Amino acid sequence: MRRTAVVLLLLAATMSAQVPVVAGEVARVRSEFALRAGEQSLTCEVTPLDAVANFAFLFEAGYVFHVPHSQYSESDGGWVVLTSVRPDGHPLEDMSLIHWVSRKRAVAAGSRFDIRGLYLLGVGSYSVESTLRDSRGRVCRKEWRVVVPASRADRAIQSKLPPYRVAPYSPIVSPDMRKPDDDAPGRLTVLLNAAAASPRRTTIGSVDRERILDALAALLEHLPATSVRVVVFSLEQQKEVLRLDRFMPSDMKRIAEAIAELPQATIDVNVLKNPMGHVDFLAGLIRGELDRADAAHMVVFLGPTSRYWEKLPKDALPAAGQSHARVFYVRYERWGRLFFSPSDSTRMSSRAPVPPSDPTRGQPDIITRAVAQLNGKTMIVHTPAELAAAIRKIEDRCGACFSLPKKSSNR
């Protein structure tokens, strides 16, 4: 019990976050997790999670501890997990991560608790040791190896993390938007559709939110803009959720919070009174962006397939060619259960499985139709590798976007 108390004190400031152990404390913390003679072990199973790419182009690996309910009473507390990751041949890059999980945050799966965690890896091979200690001081331990090969099915993705590097997982990734000094000045607007991954759902889960934030970070990091505007909108609520005219990497947290605060199971009464209001809202959103005095050179819609399928009236949008902006739509379609996060029971795979039968898949939604009216291009993505390919297509098609003449003021 004394050792468990020491560990919990170490975690008092971090609560449920998984954080690196300070280098000078590693030996002491590891000793707290060692199983000593006479102490009781914990009955559990451990599932190591192989490294897969996420939509921010980082490779996630992790673990799931499966602990039977029968070992606990209602008064028992949570668990502490210490995970040590050692890159082969690179001892200076060793990292130990500590993670406290309350019973409330553990996933109840049938007759067991599932305690989950993730970490990030660069290309390379690693030895992993993970030890779980519960509030009674009982221990469960597992060792395994993880390999992130340079040559693999998703090799089209260049990892942001250097080889043999370990980093703690975060649900919010801030893009590195530093550009070469000789980049042509250019303006980019991202119109972010805050919606559930499936058109059949209205609830935006944590996995949906993390995926769209990761994709946004990847777009902003790779597209060569020197000025960025991000507008988060909801067609379901027929409103702008957040507008950031001068986006900064630190604004990713504000976007995550704005999406999380959207009503999940309720619709404003004014929306119900105007069932076609999403058409007018979308047309106004597009016109408002293209008619600005400081209109972007490139406008990118980003988000999951919309639940709406109407075509906007011809006169609702500027005529094709009237605007100098190039318009794109990076549209995410979910193929089965593809993702894992510490708060979700599913896991993403960078390889798309056979999609379930759905007649709406690949069909033009309302945003696809609007983008087509503007002579724009829609790219449907299911996996991180396909997102990387879509970004390259935008770069190829928009090579001259930022050298276009300024819009005439007497339009």
Image (cartoon, rainbow, N blue to C red):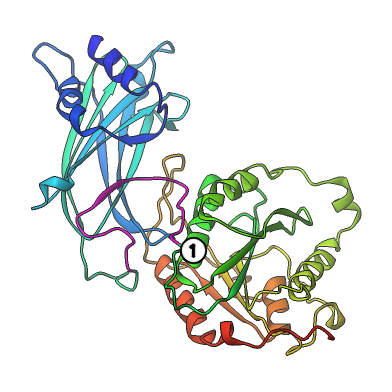
Residue at 77% in and 53% down:
237
Q: Main secondary structure of the magenta part?
A: loop
Which class describes the residues within 10 Å of circle 1: few (<14), some (14-19), or many (20+)? some
Q: Is residue 275 left or right of residue 226?
A: right
Residue at 79% in and 73% down:
287
Q: How far across and how far down the image is residue 262, in percent? A: 69, 45
Q: How far across and how far down the image is residue 375, in percent? A: 68, 87
Q: How far across and how far down the image is residue 57, in percent? A: 38, 62
Residue at 76% in and 72% down:
292
Please report the bounds of the magenta region as a residue range.
158-176
Image quadrant for the C terminus?
A: bottom right
Q: Is residue 12 above or below residue 283?
A: above
Inspect the image, locate mark 1, and give the three-letter code of the amino acid beneath it. Trp
Q: How far across and how far down the image is residue 117, in percent? A: 34, 39
Q: Nearer the viewer, residue 340 or 85?
A: 85
Q: Nearer the viewer, residue 389 or 236?
A: 389
Q: Is residue 235 above or below residue 39?
A: below
Q: Nearer the viewer, residue 301 or 175?
A: 175
Q: Is residue 284 left or right of residue 24?
A: right
Task: Report if residue 304 is visible in the image.
Answer: no
Residue at 22% in and 71% down:
151
Question: Residue beneath label 1, please?
Answer: 335
Q: Would residue 164 be counted in the magenta stretch?
A: yes
